[in-house]
Image (spheres, rainbow, N blue to C red):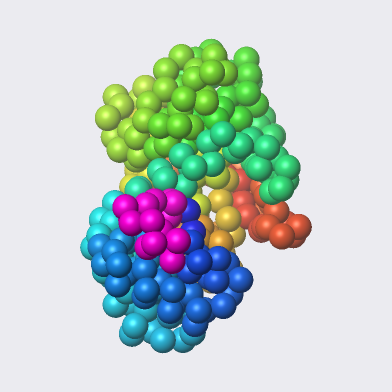
Amino acid sequence: MPLKAIHRSTGDAIADRRFAYAMAAFVEADWQVAVDLASQTLELAPGFAPAHATLGRAQAALGRKDEAIAALTEALRLDPEDELGIRIDLSRLGALDADEAISEGYVRALFDSYADGFDQHLTGALAYRGPAILIEAIHAAVAALGRKPGFDLALDLGCGTGLMAKALGPMARRIEGVDISPRMIAVAARTGLYAALHVGEVVGELDRRERASADLIVAADVVVYLGDLFPLFREAARVLRPGGLFAFTAQGHHGQGFALGIDSRFAHSDRYLRTVAEDSGLAIAHFAAVSTRQDRGLDVPGYVMVLTLPP
């Protein structure tokens, strides 16, 4: 259950203390106590969205679906940007479609909160190796296409703190980064690796770019926050120059289409990725099963895919 972006004040010291106790109970999985304390918080601060969210999540843990949906719906009404990630909970309860589960507001708040210690968390606790895997895949793709690995303009979607730009190195003459999190962009700017950086949602940023303007588009650990990938693939195909590459990592799903996992990230099936690529006019240059990260010490199954726009 998402717990980010809840550190706000009600403006009432007693209510804040009640809410802190509610959150402590929630973390300890003491669901009924969390319900009671969140309810007490709301008696003092009825418009406090985080308390409604905690109440709903605790009710859901107790199996009280209707009460949970009611509390979470009120939380979302009070927090329409959804920094609290309430849509994820509502989707799990069947009150929202899966492709509506992850909002821009949630992703922005999540990565703003991670910005300062992001690299250490990724490469340490999660053993993240997405950029290295993507570089290997790009080399394999260009070799299969009978080319050399050099690009005039590379677009780094969801650039974060700049790990992908560091991996690209001299392979790209110019790198531009896009990220929804202003704090991530600020950290990426300090690397000095980007010719330009843009704050925004990745599909929207691609939509604003000229047709056939990039040689390489990379998206490391990005599509896990998108359900339907057709808008992203369509815009990538439009922005790529003929022969250009679109390389990304994804989490694997063994069913049909895509699904929201317990880790609050989307997983996509092999068949879905192939179908969306074909429907977008992109050809597969390289596709392999990989794991880019760990969760609780276990490898998370996924894919690396490099698509090309046929000349």
At x 43%, y 55%, the residue is 6
Where residue 155 appears, as percent x and y from the top left, is 46, 27
Image quadrant holding the C terminus, namely: top left
> Taking 116 as reference, is 258 left or right?
left
User: Magenta segment: does it hold 10?
Assistant: yes
> Taking 171 as reference, is 186 left or right?
left
Residue that sits furthest to the front in the current view: 14
Residue that sits furthest to the right in the current view: 297
Q: How many numbered discs? A: 0
Frontmost residue, 41 versus 58:
41
Question: Residue 37 appears in which quarter of the rendering?
Answer: bottom left
Would residue 233 be seen by someone viewing this image from the given angle?
no
Where residue 168 appears, as percent x and y from the top left, is 61, 24
Is 76 above or below relative to 56? above
At x 43%, y 66%, the residue is 18
Q: What span is in magenta?
A: 5-18
